[in-house]
Image (spheres, rainbow, N blue to C red):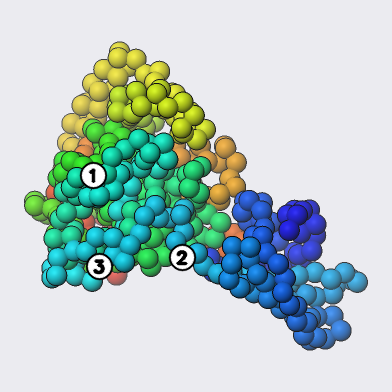
């Protein structure tokens, strides 16, 4: 209960495994990192201990526990004696699940809002990112003070209303990073939602709550937004399908903005079928997409293991040189910063201390963007958009959805910033052009300390209004052999 990390580390064998409802960790290093990042041992009382002798040098210890929060739990540990010292070789921890995980959900219901009696989404359940208006509830945008200062919405936002009309039920309002200004998924006020695909990994943000709700099976559709990758990154980190729509194709009414030039609604699901039905129920225009193309320089912004998985999966494709990823990133970031401060700066100045350190620092940098810098970035944005449209045409750009697998919640600042910048250099293409982008769970990378590989999304960036075609193309990629380049 003292959470004495050195003592706990010393009690576990080098080849120990540890499991709980989130998954299994393998190896002393992975278990130690998890222990450092969990913020302390769950407070509980041991009610009973049962020891089962297996041999002179092995015993199974089972304890019944009573968490201070109520209910009953259980711990099982296999102890072995090696060189005279007893160590935990395997451990499993079971604790009562909370009725509602406040790191995932802000409000839940059974359902919260009932949809139409019949429709293409009948039987589906929706986790609404806490940026959209849901009638009768205020929007919190991941910031408690913002929630406290808001008024209940008079009506549903159009993006919510259309899902309800198609027969889906809204089961709750799910958490987001503060003002959706992050791609990590951490929230200092409500906590970090779990990532069931990567034990101890961040969920990805800013659509962290909807993504985790979908991954955990608590909803089948996460109604989300994507500015710089906030749908694609959590989908990639958690092995989900995620679709950013063509900019302007879904109404942004009743939606808290971050950077309106880039903000795009979209959905996160566990299956392509549900994603396709959600998109079809909402989008009015549909276009075809052409052949696949790869930019090796852009894909090289990913970490080496992600690059290797990407190359192995996509095979040999036609290539294109889109330009300098650093220019993409800097142009996108400057316009995003200027708009983010214009959108929320006055409120932030009127509520000092309302934001956590990371997002507060991001907004502080945004406040420094001058009118001249913004104007120059917008001129570059217009040039890049025309340039990228000319090069891509109706072709579909293939690129990793994120630069890495889900990083650890205990990752150092250098790792966080390196993977963030690598990701944003790749995700910026969709934002700069206003094109739709799909993250399909088609790649995986070995994950040290885990028994299962970690998911990585394959991103398909297509021509405007090609959302349904992108889903169909991703499904074809899942079964097709690697392609050879077309003859010129």
**Quick check: 86 left or right of 405?**
right
Which residue, given by chain and number where applicable, does mark 1 sit on?
A: 153
Question: Image height check: is 78 above or below 445?
Answer: below
Give the crowd class for mark 3: few <14, some 14-19, many >=20 residues within 10 Å. many
Give the crowd class for mark 1: few <14, some 14-19, many >=20 residues within 10 Å. some
Q: Quadrant of residue 215?
A: bottom left
Which residue, given by chain and number where applicable, does mark 3 sit on?
A: 124
In depth, the one of 50 and 88 nearer the eye is 50
* Sequence order check, earlier mark of 1 and 3: 3
**Quick check: 205 left or right of 485?**
right
Q: Secondary structure at mark 1?
A: loop
Marks 1 and 2 close (CB-CB < 8 Å): no
Image coordinates for residue 35, horizontal then vertical, percent: 66, 56
Instruction: Give the residue displayed 30% in from the left and 24% down from the top.
Output: 342
**Badge nearest the viewer, 1 or 3:** 1
Give the crowd class for mark 2: few <14, some 14-19, many >=20 residues within 10 Å. few
Which residue, given by chain and number where applicable, does mark 2 sit on?
A: 99
Question: Image height check: is 169 above or below 362?
Answer: below
The residues bearing labels 3 and 2 have C-alpha atoms spaced at a distance of 21 Å
The residues bearing labels 1 and 3 have C-alpha atoms spaced at a distance of 23 Å
Question: Image height check: is 85 above or below 309?
Answer: below
Image coordinates for residue 118, horizontal then vertical, percent: 13, 70
């Amino acid at each position: 209960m003292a959470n004495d990390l050195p003592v706990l580390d010393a009690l576990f064998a080098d080849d120990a495994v540890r499991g709980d409802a989130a998954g299994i960790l393998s190896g002393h290093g992975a278990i130690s990192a998890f222990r450092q990042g969990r913020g302390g041992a769950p407070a509980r009382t041991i009610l009973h201990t049962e020891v089962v002798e297996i041999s002179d040098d092995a015993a199974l210890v089972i304890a019944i526990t009573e968490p201070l929060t109520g209910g009953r739990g259980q711990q099982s540990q296999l102890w072995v004696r090696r060189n005279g010292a007893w160590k935990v070789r395997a451990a499993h921890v079971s604790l009562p699940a909370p009725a509602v995980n406040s790191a995932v959900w802000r409000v839940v219901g059974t359902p919260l809002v009932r949809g139409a009696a019949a429709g293409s989404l009948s039987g589906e359940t929706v986790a609404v990112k806490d940026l959209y208006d849901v009638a009768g509830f205020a929007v919190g945008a991941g910031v408690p003070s913002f929630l406290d200062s808001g008024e209940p919405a008079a009506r549903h936002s159009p993006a919510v209303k259309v899902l309800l009309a198609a027969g889906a039920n809204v089961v709750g309002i799910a958490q987001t990073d503060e003002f959706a200004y992050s791609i990590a998924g951490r929230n200092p006020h409500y906590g970090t939602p779990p990532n069931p695909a990567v034990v101890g990994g961040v969920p990805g943000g800013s659509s962290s709550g909807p993504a985790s709700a979908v991954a955990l099976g608590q909803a089948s559709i996460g109604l989300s937004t994507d500015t710089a990758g906030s749908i694609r990154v959590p989908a990639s980190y958690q092995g989900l399908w995620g679709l950013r729509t063509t900019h302007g194709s879904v109404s942004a009414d009743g939606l808290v903005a971050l950077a309106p030039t880039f903000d795009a609604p979209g959905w996160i699901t566990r299956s392509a079928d549900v994603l396709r039905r959600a998109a079809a129920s909402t989008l009015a225009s549909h276009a075809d997409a052409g052949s696949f193309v790869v930019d090796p320089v852009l894909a090289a912004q990913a970490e080496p293991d992600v690059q290797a998985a990407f190359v192995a999966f996509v095979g040999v494709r036609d290539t294109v040189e889109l330009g300098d990823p650093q220019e993409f990133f800097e142009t996108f970031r400057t316009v995003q910063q200027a708009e983010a401060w214009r959108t929320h700066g006055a409120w932030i100045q009127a509520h000092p201390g309302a934001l956590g350190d990371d997002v507060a620092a991001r907004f502080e940098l945004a406040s420094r963007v001058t009118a001249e810098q913004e104007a120059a970035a917008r001129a570059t944005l217009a040039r890049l958009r025309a340039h990228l449209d000319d090069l891509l045409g109706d072709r579909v750009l293939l690129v990793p959805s994120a630069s890495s697998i889900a990083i650890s919640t205990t990752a150092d600042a250098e790792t966080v910033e390196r993977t963030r910048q690598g990701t944003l250099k790749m995700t910026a293409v969709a934002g700069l052009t206003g094109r739709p982008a799909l993250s399909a769970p088609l790649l995986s990378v070995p994950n040290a300390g885990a028994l299962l590989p970690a998911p990585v999304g394959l991103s398909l960036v297509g021509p405007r209004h090609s959302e349904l075609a992108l889903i169909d193309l991703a499904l074809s990629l899942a079964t097709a052999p690697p392609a050879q380049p077309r003859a010129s």
